Amino acid sequence: MKIIKELIPYLVIILTVIVIRTFLFTPIMVQGESMVPTLKGNELMILKKYDQSYERFDIVVVNKNVEGDNLIKRVIGLPNETIEYIDGKLYINDKIITDKYASGITEDFHKYTLGDDEYFLMGDNRTISLDSRILGVIKKDEIEGTVGIVIYPFNRFGKVE
């Protein structure tokens, strides 16, 4: 009985960590250069899982194992919108939107019409990003959450947009 009483605090700690990592926050490593210059690769970030509302230009993690990694991309198109690039300009619902995060040349692409639970995601480094232009639209249930804080390397510690 004494051993069980001594183990209870450790079990509570383990259960707390499991609950936090499963439902609230978990660390995630940035792989590749598709989000350069915002994220350079090999940053350790905190994935926020509990908020399931996404806004344009949020950075999200997608549960698509492409080349063994989850994807980290930026939300460009929201549910029930149309999105296209014409002459290097972003059009959402046929209106020009300033895309201040785009790096490199964004090739024109045809109009996508998003459904009720669909998002259009792109990497900031448009020249090399494997994103919705290739993979297609992303369903809301494929998005694991948002990232916005780098915790390592320490010289990059802090919030990112």
Image (cartoon, helix red, strand yellow):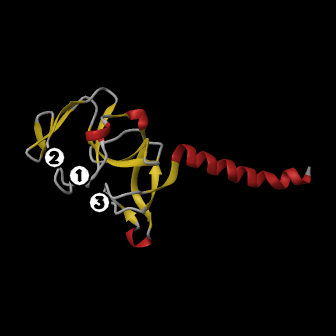
Judge whether 79 appears above or below 144 on screen. above
Quarter of the figure with residue 103: bottom left
Quarter of the figure with residue 100: bottom left
Which residue is drawn at the image coordinates 41% and 59% (left, top)? 149
Element on which disc 3 rests? loop
Q: Nearer the viewer, mark 2 or mark 3?
A: 2
Disc 2 marks a residue whose amino acid type is Glu
Q: Contact, CB < 8 Å: mark 1 with mark 3? A: no
Which residue is drawn at the image coordinates 47% and 48% (left, top)? 68
Q: Residue furthest right?
A: 1
Q: Which image quadrant: the C terminus?
A: bottom left
Q: Contact, CB < 8 Å: mark 1 with mark 2? A: yes
Q: Residues within 10 Å of mark 3 (few under 14, many from 20)?
A: some
Report the front residue among 51 and 143. Answer: 143
Disc 1 marks a residue whose amino acid type is Arg
Position in image of residue 39 (x %, y %): 34, 60
N-term mark: 1 or 3:
3
Q: Which residue is mark 1?
A: 126
Which residue is drawn at the image coordinates 27% and 36% (left, top)? 78
